[in-house]
Image (cartoon, rainbow, N blue to C red):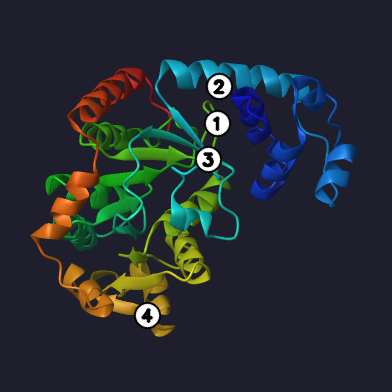
Amino acid sequence: MHDLQLRLAINRMTGLRPHEKLQLEDLVDSERFFCSLTAPLLSRITGRPIAEHAAAPDDLLRMAERDLRYIRSNRVHVIPCYDAKYPAMLREIYDPPYLLYLRGELPAWDSLMIAVVGTRDPGAEAVISAMQLGRELSGDGFYVISGLARGIDCAAHQGALSAGGLTGAVLGSGIDAVTPYSSRETAARMLDSGGFLLSEYAPGVHAAKYHFPARNRIISGLSRGVVIVQAPARSGALITADYALDHGRDLFVHSVGVNGAAGAGSSDLAADGALIIDSARDIYAEWGIEPEPRFATAVRKASPPVDSRDAGRQLAEELRFSLQGSGRE
């Protein structure tokens, strides 16, 4: 099947798992076939009970048609999981997203990526430490990955930007909606500097509580290592830590975030064996590397050329324009 609209329609079938969507793509060769799909037929295809979808197949095709118009008019890239541009490390995890919607530019396949995440309600010292860590990693050529949430996530992105480095965010909403509102200027700066926004959700899909654990698996899947700067008990950042362990990624906790109730989750991770770090240097020591200026040079050479950066700046301006007047969280 080569019809992008059909792929977009399949991706909107929320009752299917990523690998089941890929399985369905191998079978569906026409809109007529797609419109014939019923819950019993999908159950036979997937080998498990599938409930009736909220939207009928013909409605999904109409939504996919709107998605197609949006991605073409806004220069959004759609990357299937079997595409050569799909991040190789992400493809290795148990349930890689069927499709990725991308604004901006993904880093080169051999770029060094590390996730920096934490609570939405950090202490002042933790915010400063997240910014400093983002600045150090980015300055040494690492690509800083996070989720654009308020607090630690946004501080890590801002630290990377302050070093003139590259940073990318994975969204828990459609690629057209950055939440919270307070993170939207940071998102525009990321695109302006050659970074990226990434989502597995179709345009127009609002952020939902259950989206964020799924989002966190992508953050971990993209990264060589994950740093939890500060996380209380039951923090969403702990889900990212669990995924890091499942994915075989190295897990670190920052020393600034292991004390008190605000750091109860981080403290538990350290007690279970996560390495406590004070700075990026401790990560490098664990990995047995000594970053030199050539690391940063390699990443910058792999980043978009001048004309792509110009396109990124235009995307950033479009994002700023689209966010005016919207106060959704």
Image quadrant assignment for residue 237: bottom left
- The x, y position of residue 277, in whole percent, is 24, 75
Residue designated by label 3:
200
- Mark carried by residue 67: 2
Residue at screen point 83% across, 35% down: 52
In space, the residues marked 3 and 2 are separated at their CA atoms by: 13 Å
Q: Is residue 155 left or right of residue 101?
A: left
Q: Residue furthest left?
A: 293
Determine crowd level at label 1: few under 14, some 14-19, many 20+ residues with C-alpha closer than 10 A.
many
Q: Is residue 186 left or right of residue 26?
A: left
Viewer-nearest of labels 1 and 4? Answer: 1
- Mark carried by residue 270: 4
Viewer-nearest of labels 4 and 2? Answer: 2
Marks 2/1 in contact by CB < 8 Å: the verdict is yes
- The x, y position of residue 201, in whole percent, is 54, 36
Q: Amino acid at mark 1?
A: Ala
Q: Earlier in the sequence, mark 2 or mark 1?
A: 2
Q: Is residue 304 left or right of residue 31?
A: left
| Nearer to me, 27 or 129 | 27
Marks 1/3 in contact by CB < 8 Å: the verdict is no
Residue designated by label 1:
202
Q: Quadrant of the N terminus?
A: top right
| Nearer to me, 168 or 268 | 168
Residue at screen point 23% across, 62% down: 126
